Image: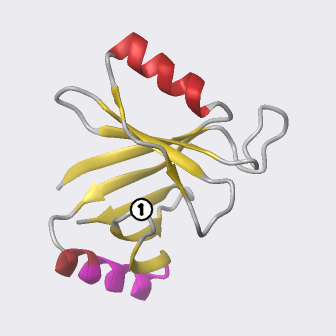
Amino acid sequence: MRIAHVALWTADLDGLCRFWAETFGAVVGDLYESARRPGFCSRFLTLKGGPSIEVMQGPWITREEPQERQGYAHLALSLGSRKAVDAMAAQAAASGILLSPARMTGDGFYEAVLKDPDGNLIEITV
């Protein structure tokens, strides 16, 4: 198992991408704009030899009393296959920790979402 990517909410997508590119040499990926969640957009930052960071922005993320806080949003774990994702999602459902069943997302990932005991989100993906 390996970390596929981590995700970070921000109120300033372009500014944060610029910071990671200038400070750490990250390669900034194309802008993704969700058709399912109006106003949601993201970019992936690719670090040499490390995991990717998905930087996400939406109108509900503000610096003043955000509905969802700024900071890391979830950890994504790559399980290697759809079969493994389906199996873990079934186990999570039986345990009552499955938030979103396995599905193909609008941005091309096959994933399910679990919640850890502290309420942190964990995406399991291929």
Which amino acid type is marked by label 1?
Answer: Asp
User: Which residue lies under the disc numbered 1?
Assistant: 107
Q: Quadrant of residue 35?
A: bottom right
Quarter of the picture containing the C terminus is bottom left
Residue 105 as seen in the image, left or right of residue 27? right
Magenta residues: mostly which secondary structure?
A: helix
Residue at image coords 25%, 82%: 87
Q: Where is residue 26 in the image (x, y as percent from the top left)?
A: 33, 24
Asked if residue 92 is among those painted magenta in the image, a careful observer would answer yes
The residue at the point 41 percent across, 12 percent down is: 22
Residue occupying the far right of the picture = 64
**Toward the viewer: 15 or 94?**
15
Residue sitting nearer the eye, 83 or 29: 29
Per the rendered image, the range of residues in magenta is 86-96
* Residue at 27% from the left image edge and 50% from the top image edge: 4
Please state, as top left, top right, bottom left or bottom right, where the N terminus lies in the image: bottom left
Q: Position of residue 55 (x, y in %)?
A: 49, 39
| As drawn, 19 above or below 76 | above
Look at the picture and state if 66 lies above or below 77.
Answer: above
Q: Position of residue 24 (x, y in %)?
A: 35, 15
